[in-house]
Amino acid sequence: MDDLTSAWLADLERRHLADLTSSEVARALRALSSCYVERRAKLAEGDALGSRGKRAAFALFYGPLHFLVTREIVRAIPDARSVTSIVDIGCGTGAAGIAWAAAAGAPRVLGFDRSAWAVDEALLAYRAFRLDGRAVRRDFAVRPGRADKPIRAAAGTGILAAYTVNELDDDSRASLLRHLQSSRRQGSRVLVIEPIARRTSPWWGEWVEAFSRLGGRSDEWRFAASLPPTQQQLARASGLDPRELTARSLFA
């Protein structure tokens, strides 16, 4: 593991374990995992980050996992490394966008998230990786009476939606797909990453067809899990067993 990644993980531990014990974070991680697997309707209501413990669990466990998975996917797709900047939709703590930027040697990242807490976390992470990074609040959900803003990205920009699309309702998801298609036609590269379980994403087949029409690809990934010590401990304590890092992706 490189020095910047190690320093980022150490800073996460220092901040998020300052007022919480590892056992408290592990309990929150169990609740958070249940939210993702069994109660996905709660995600649109912001339940995933609804308590200090869940926020710490997300930052300490899911953030690093998303970083590792995204880094391996980008390393495995040569065209994904031909970008000069990243736009990260639903950036969370910034981990996935940073992984793409680092793997591609792209110095700039712009992250969007509806959560003020996530935006603050992403800003800290961008600084930890010495990126020219900016994160701002933006909700990609379609709301009555609110203009549907386009995603502005120039040719050579990588647009990322990692573990984000499945949290949107049907109308918002359709709107985002239109924006991603438009950005690809204008020269951006687009990467979508979601969990491998199909039953939680009935919309996936439609998106596979849409990316195919753009000349894109659909992949399923299984990488050997080599988690840092803190993430291994949290996984064991919360009853998780990530022997593999799995995901599926769309790229165009």
Image: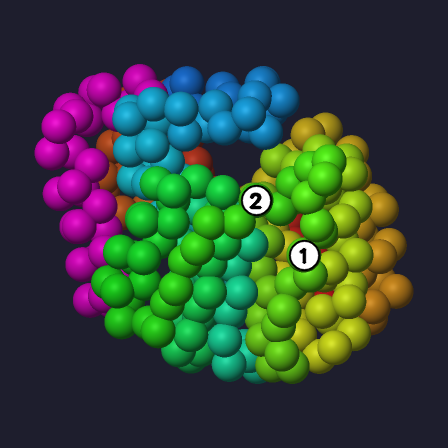
Q: Is residue 14 visible?
A: yes
Dot 2 corresponds to which residue?
Answer: 139
User: In the picture shown, does residue 170 fall above or below 153?
Assistant: above
Q: Position of residue 194 (x, y in %)?
A: 61, 45
User: In the picture shown, does residue 45 fall above or below 222?
Assistant: above
Where does the N terminus fall, quadrant-wise? bottom left
Q: Earlier in the sequence, mark 1 or mark 2?
A: 2
Q: Position of residue 252 (x, y in %)?
A: 72, 68
The local crowd at label 2, few if under 14, some if 14 to 19, many if 20 or more residues have their Cα within 10 Å, is some
User: In the picture shown, does residue 161 fall above or below 44?
Assistant: below
Q: Which one is in front, 167 or 64?
A: 167
Dot 1 corresponds to which residue?
Answer: 149
Q: Is residue 91 visible?
A: no
Q: Which one is in front, 1 or 119?
A: 119
Q: Position of residue 234 (x, y in %)?
A: 28, 30
Check if residue 26 falls in the magenta segment.
Answer: yes
Residue in the picture at 42% in, 74% down? 108
Q: Which one is in front, 114 or 190?
A: 114
Task: Identify the magenta region.
Answer: 1-29
Where, by quadrant of the figure, is residue 199 drawn? top right
For badge 2, the amino acid type reads Asp
